[in-house]
Image (cartoon, grey):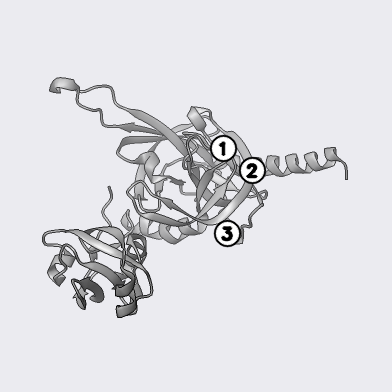
Amino acid sequence: MNDEDVLDAYSRSVVHAVETVGPAVVKVDVTREPEPRAGGRGRGQPPEGSGSGFVFAHDGLILTNSHVVEGAASLAAELPDGRRLPADMVGQDPDTDLAVLKISAPDLSVATLGDSSQLRAGQLVVAVGNPYGLQHSVTAGVVSALGRSLRSKNGRLMDSIIQTDAALNPGNSGGPLVTTDGSVVGVNTAMIRGGQGLSFAVPINTARMFIPALLSEGRVRRSYLGIGVQDVPLLRRVVRYFRLPSESGTLVVAVEKGGPAEAAGVRDGDIIVEFAGEPVSGADDLHRLLTRERVGRRVPLTLLRGTERITVDVTPGDRGRIN
């Protein structure tokens, strides 16, 4: 096989992926409420932005990023055939940076959702989107790594993130990451500014998991304790004495008045080391354990308070409000 044959095979793979998913990729235009003018006199021009998305159901459902549509006063979707349609917000989840919109139009092309669990490092992937408003721009690369963690805009850690070297730019957010057969395996969400070839996508299997909740409730319910925390190291003698599985814990630095933690007797200065029987070495462990199934269900919370190890029962509340 000569170099031309390899290049042709590569080109054919990318072209096929783009031709398969391209008709379902849309440009998402966002208009936000105008900011008050300086001095309080009137309002300025409405700030506008744009991103990408893709139709994933024949009834006009579009998947995109939550940060693309955050604070939108109005939304519109522009299709590859030139049609521009108003879009309605169905639901969004800032913690996974996913949002679902809906448009009404006949003859919509629909993207096929793949299985992100089958991805392998080194696999060829293609990103389609609208960077800087340049519609249907295509970039290609490989899966650089799987199982990365990425901080969402509201501070929660997103797990199982796909890292690729397919170039992304502002406006690519919300667009599909696809394999060579045109199946969507991720939703492009971020890149490292100033970095080279450091791009990230939310796995499509994560989207599959949360889309039903976004369709039925417009949000994803999660439990919360009503505390502010920070990660802290633990003294080795404390770890040995209490036989703790980790050398770090989660220090409570604030307790919300009237919140679940206050009702359970949690105080500033307590160090959380276990929740619902699971070890907690930091805030991210706690976030992972605060699932929707915990809402309204009493669970044990183990704390270090001074020289004592104590356990209190806490009933997490519902933190599933849309931001």
In space, the residues marked 1 and 3 are separated at their CA atoms by 27 Å
Question: Pointer 2 and pointer 1: residues touching (CB < 8 Å)?
Answer: no
> Residue 43, percent across and down?
20, 23
- Crowd tier of the residue under label 3, counting other residues whose Cα lies within 10 Å: few below 14, some 14–19, many 20 or above: some
Asked if 208 appears above or below 101 in the picture, the reply is below
Counting residues from the start of the chain, the first of labels 2 and 1 encountered is 2
Q: Residue at x 69, y 39 (%)?
A: 15
Counting residues from the start of the chain, the first of labels 3 and 2 encountered is 3
Label 3 sits on residue: 115
Q: On residue 196, which mark appears? A: 1
Of labels 2 and 1, the one closer to you: 1
* Element type at mark 1: loop
Of labels 3 and 2, the one closer to you: 2
- Using the image as rendered, state which of residue 98 and residue 144 is in the foreground: 144
> Residue 182, percent across and down?
63, 48
Q: Residue at x 63, y 40 (%)?
A: 140
* Element type at mark 3: loop
